[in-house]
Image (cartoon, rainbow, N blue to C red):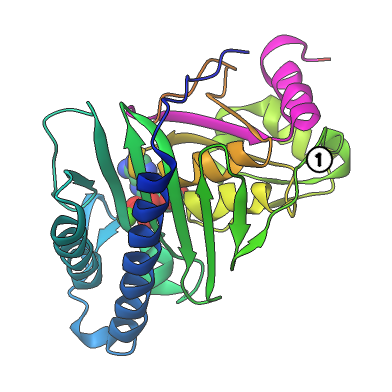
Amino acid sequence: MSTSPIPPMDPIRLSELRDVAVRVVRQAAQLAREMALAPQDLDVAAKSGRNDLVTAADKAVEELVVAELTAATSLPVLGEEGHTIDSFAGLVWVLDPIDGTMNYVATHRDFAVSLALCADGVPVIGVVADVMADHLYCAVTGQGATCDSQPLLHLGQGPSRRDCVIITDLKEIQALPRLAQCLTESRGHRRYGSAALECVEVAAGRAGAFVHMWVSPWDIAAAWLICREVGGVVTRIDGTALDVRHKGSILVGAERTHSELLQRLMIDPS
Ligand code: 2AM
Ligand code: CA
């Protein structure tokens, strides 16, 4: 299976930038929590469809994060709610101010702030805040991943696809009958509504795999690194390499779980 090359970076600069990312994501999570206390002011609007939402909180968190990152690092920021970049060359921040906006509006839990630093399009720092659960996941390339500063364990081979919970959505189940069969044969199906948190569930060993048809760079850039740093395999749903610069599908799991699901979904239907 092909993997993206990790560009070498000065470790001191990397740890300074990690500290900036953690500080700013904590501030962002605090603002998202505070704004959730005044839902009447959220100004909820639909974007591409009635289930694709943006709120005043998405915009305010993005503004806060971009201002703080620019002041601290002067590096370009790609943000879901309007901040664009000319290219992914060099160091670029990739931000989802609120991943799981429908949850932010409707269920008031299971939403994240997701921030990655990419070097030539490859994540080298990833920070994901599970805002309401108050957990902070962090990874630095080559240095492993943590939850609240405690190391996440390496996933190893992982369970058989039959012996784990699999995270996916109704759209995927409807589009992929073989996936529906895999869920039936598994320990069960889960769905949280934030791609970043769903990847992190796999990285933390709570779920065996996550399958999604359509994720954007800001949804998964940070979680991609968190998964990779614990030995997770992250590809497109057909097993090809996942370049976080482009929208597309995602299949995440420990080595054995990923390989068994890929085999079942794409190669051998029996
Ligand atoms: P969001 O909350 O930042 O929009 C829910 O299925 C997951 O998919 C969330 O991570 C959500 O991110 C993301 N999502 C929602 N609409 C999307 C779209 N049109 N394209 C890509 N990802 C989307
Ligand atoms: Ca978002």
Whether residue 260 sits left or right of residue 163 in the image: it is: left
**Is 141 above or below relative to 3?**
below
Question: Residue 48: x percent and y percent?
Answer: 23, 46
Place residue 58 in its image quadrant: bottom left
In the rendered structure, the answer to whether residue 57 lies left or right of residue 170 reads left
Residues packed near mark 1 inside 10 Å, few (<14), some (14 to 19) or many (20 plus) = few
Residue at point 79%, 24% (across, down): 260
Compared to residue 206, the image places residue 123 above or below, namely: above
Q: Quadrant of the N terminus?
A: top right
Amino acid type of the residue that numbered disc 1 sits on in the rendered structure: Thr
Magenta segment boundaries in residue numbering: 245-269
Image-based side of 30 in relation to 58, left or right: right
Residue 51 visible to the viewer: no
Determine whether the residue tagged by mark 1 lies in a helix, strand or loop: helix
Query: On the image, numbered disc 1 is attached to which residue?
Result: 184
Foreground residue among 240 and 190: 240
> Which residue is more in the foreground, 247 or 155?
155
Q: Is residue 21 magenta?
A: no
